[in-house]
Image (spheres, rainbow, N blue to C red):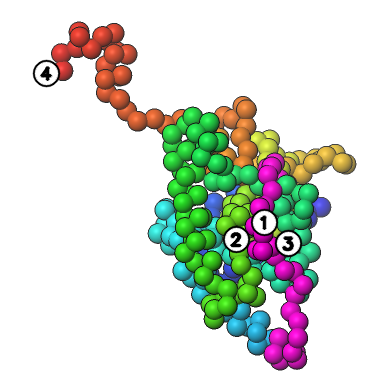
């Protein structure tokens, strides 16, 4: 029996996508969201005023959020606003509204949203020392680039929002650690779709772990606008539901999901071409090679 739920794009109007249709959801992560002193979330929801005042304020904050999402750092592959930032901002927006958010029950299930529950530890969140321990240049460079834009956006944009007309977060200061958490949730748990084009956080389905030999798959039903998780083989009672996130090498798995596979058939390595090394390998010694 297929498991079905209504699709909810965390930013249905603004998220652009180069979605692959592969699921992007990992609970194989570790680490937790940092909370700086004085910058923890207030999740008490809306207060004060009449219903019209609350409605007006909510509409104003939502409009401010959409403006933020329209002006996020550009993705390196498309040149358009990075969907990861757009989804992360929506997660933070819903989190800040606490029980007043219609997504509050779902937000509370996200790893790192509650104390004691570990959050995704993607490579971007590693310290400089930890990155160097990876000993793989392209992965270190990509993680450092992601970390640069995460920290730069936090410093240049989010720290300046409180008490301004462009603040959608009810005056709460979103710390660098909180933005890092939201980005890691967006990257590790979003589903990418080609039709309709976009990225979505789908409750319950984002809890399925990755396996090369999956026992389920994700399908979008355009007639009913629902996402379905359908078993592709007999699943014994009590067995975990497993999805294949796609064919990713270990570098990309660590960048997006926070884990690697010990026996990964899609793993690959890239390195700069050193012509001297190639010549030595071919001829045994540079002194015997006539390069003229």
Q: Which residue is mark 4?
A: 292
- Determine the image quadrant of residue 165: bottom right
Asked if labels 1 and 2 touch by Cβ distance under 8 angstroms, the answer is yes
For the record, the magenta segment spans 26-54
Total labels drawn: 4
> Looking at the picture, does residue 265 appear above or below residue 44?
above
Q: Is residue 169 above or below residue 37?
A: below
State which tag comes first along the sequence, 3 or 1: 1
Q: Residue at x 39, y 30 (%)?
A: 271
Circle 4 crowding by C-alpha within 10 Å: few under 14, some 14–19, many from 20: few
Mark 1 crowd level (few <14, some 14–19, many ≥20, 10 Å Cα): some
Disc 1 on helix, strand or loop? loop
Residue 279 appears anywhere in the view = yes
> Alpha carbon of mark 2 to alpha carbon of mark 1: how far?
7 Å
Inter-mark Cα distance, 4 to 1: 62 Å
Crowding at label 2, few (<14), some or many (≥20) Cα neighbours within 10 Å? many
Q: Is residue 65 above or below residue 92?
A: below
- How much space separates mark 4 and mark 2, taking CA atoms? 59 Å
Among the two numbered marks 2 and 3 on one chain, the one whose residue lies closer to the N terminus: 3
Q: Position of residue 106 (x, y in %)?
A: 75, 62
User: In the rendered image, is residue 221 in sight?
Assistant: no
Marking on residue 175 = 2
Residue 2 highlighted magenta (yes or no): no
Q: As displayed, is residue 162 above or below residue 251?
A: below
Which residue is denoted by mark 1 in the rendering?
35
Residue 100's spot in the image, x, y percent?
76, 74
Residue at 69% in and 42% down? 30
């Amino acid at each position: 029996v297929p498991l079905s739920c209504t699709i909810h794009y965390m930013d249905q109007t603004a998220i652009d996508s180069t979605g692959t249709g592969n699921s992007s959801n990992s609970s194989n992560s570790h680490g937790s969201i940092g909370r700086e002193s004085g910058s923890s979330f207030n999740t008490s929801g809306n207060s004060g005023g009449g219903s019209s005042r609350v409605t007006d304020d909510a509409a104003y904050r939502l409009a401010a959020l959409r403006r933020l999402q329209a002006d996020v750092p550009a993705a390196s592959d498309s040149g358009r606003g990075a969907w990861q930032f757009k989804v992360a901002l929506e997660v933070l927006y819903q989190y800040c509204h606490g029980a007043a958010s219609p997504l509050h029950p779902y937000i509370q299930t996200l790893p790192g949203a509650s104390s004691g529950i570990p959050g995704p530890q993607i490579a971007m969140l590693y310290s400089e020392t930890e990155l160097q321990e990876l000993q793989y240049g392209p992965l270190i460079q990509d993680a450092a680039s992601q970390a640069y834009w995460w920290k730069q956006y936090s410093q240049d944009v989010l720290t300046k929002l409180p008490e301004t007309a462009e603040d959608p977060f009810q005056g709460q200061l979103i710390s660098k650690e909180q933005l890092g958490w939201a980005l890691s949730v967006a990257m590790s748990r979003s589903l990418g779709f080609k039709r309709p084009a976009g990225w979505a956080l789908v409750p319950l389905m984002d809890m399925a772990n990755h396996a090369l030999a999956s026992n389920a798959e994700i399908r979008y039903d355009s007639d009913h606008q629902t996402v379905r998780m359908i078993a592709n083989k007999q699943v014994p009672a009590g067995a975990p539901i497993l999805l294949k996130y796609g064919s990713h090498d270990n570098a990309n798995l660590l960048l997006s999901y926070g884990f690697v596979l010990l026996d990964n058939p899609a793993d690959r390595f890239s390195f700069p071409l050193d012509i001297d090394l190639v010549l030595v390998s071919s001829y045994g010694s540079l002194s015997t090679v006539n390069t003229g």
